[in-house]
Amino acid sequence: MSIAKINEVTKANSQRVCGVVASSAAGGLLGIANINGAVAQPAFSTDYSIDLNGSNQYVNLSNVTGTTINPTSTQINATGYTFTAWIYIDTLSGGEYIYNLGSSGTNNYYGLKLVANGNGALVWHIFGLNGSTPGAGTNNRNSVRTQNSTIAAGQWYHVAAVIPSMTRSGWKLYVNGVSQSSLVVSGNQNVNLTYSGSSSIGVWTKASPANYFDGEINNAAIFDTDLNQTNMTAIYNSGTPINLLTNAGNYNTSGNLVAWWRFNEGTGTVYEDSSDEGLFEGEGVGTPGWSTNVP
């Protein structure tokens, strides 16, 4: 075999090993093929949202008391917590419940709540005991909200409650990556956070469930740390959801992700927890639908 032929064979084999396919027509590089059988992962995409009808549909997370998504006051004080979601409200009525964590079957106030109220304010509640006394009044809640008309029907928002500790003065509410100013506080700053019953998304499961969410929810996530402004801006990403499992750019808190419901299945009524541990699968009540209306 001639030296020229040997060089041609060597060049061809080298191209196969590197996975490079040359285009004789274009005289350049067309693409990179498989390397050691590995296939490049597709880009992160959001194709569906869960669609709730505002009357009898929600996501049941079961009783998860004692887990990382029903944190105690001690846990919140130790690490901080953040609760986020993308929401699209079809009709803003008496209060659209996003998160209802650790409260069901009672009219007394228990657990953690993130709500868009009827005036278009984003509201965060910590419910529990007034000392050792249960109840359903001002003394059994510790609350903060944005100004009215922060949220309106008919458009997507990324909302978040960032809770560095049980001290209310440090709480922050974010809308579309922006920390809201002039928050309105109310209730009992010394309420004793207490859970009683199941957790849910899209409803307040009182003795008679109420405040059903009317619209779409997408990429709801909980972190066991208080996310800073840099991370909140990165997660908002100018209005496009990101892959929360992978640190990239200014987002660096994937290790603190304890629950993540993408609501991207597009079929059925079982909703995967896409966080690394995947402990908190949700189940649809009332047969929620699917929508291709996505952020």
Image: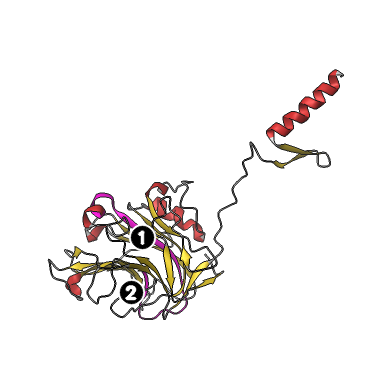
Q: Which residue is mark 2?
A: 204
Q: Identify the residue at image location x=47%, y=74%.
A: 288
Where residue 141 sits: x, y (%)?
22, 69
Outermost residue on the right side: it is 2
Q: Is residue 2 above or below residue 163?
A: above
Q: Nearer the viewer, residue 279 or 174?
A: 279
Residue 83: which disc?
Answer: 1
Give the quadrant of the N terminus. top right
Q: Please tell me which residue is depicted at 71% across the width and 42% down the height of the picture.
A: 31
- Which secondary structure, mark 2? loop
* Callout 2 amino acid: Trp
Q: Name the spot of residue 32 as percent of width and height, x first.
A: 68, 40
Q: Which residue is located at x 50 percent, y 61 percent?
A: 239
Query: In this picture, is 166 found above or below 141?
Result: above
Specify which label sits upstream in the sequence, 1 or 2: 1
Question: Coloured how?
Answer: secondary structure
| Left or right: 167 in relation to 15 | left
Question: Is 252 rendered above or below residue 198?
Answer: above
In the image, taking residue 182 as reference, residue 215 lies left or right, namely: right
Q: CA distance from mark 1 to mark 2?
A: 16 Å
Q: Amino acid at mark 1?
A: Phe
Foreground mark, 1 or 2, reads 2
Magenta residues?
A: 76-99
Residue at point 55% right, 54% down? 44
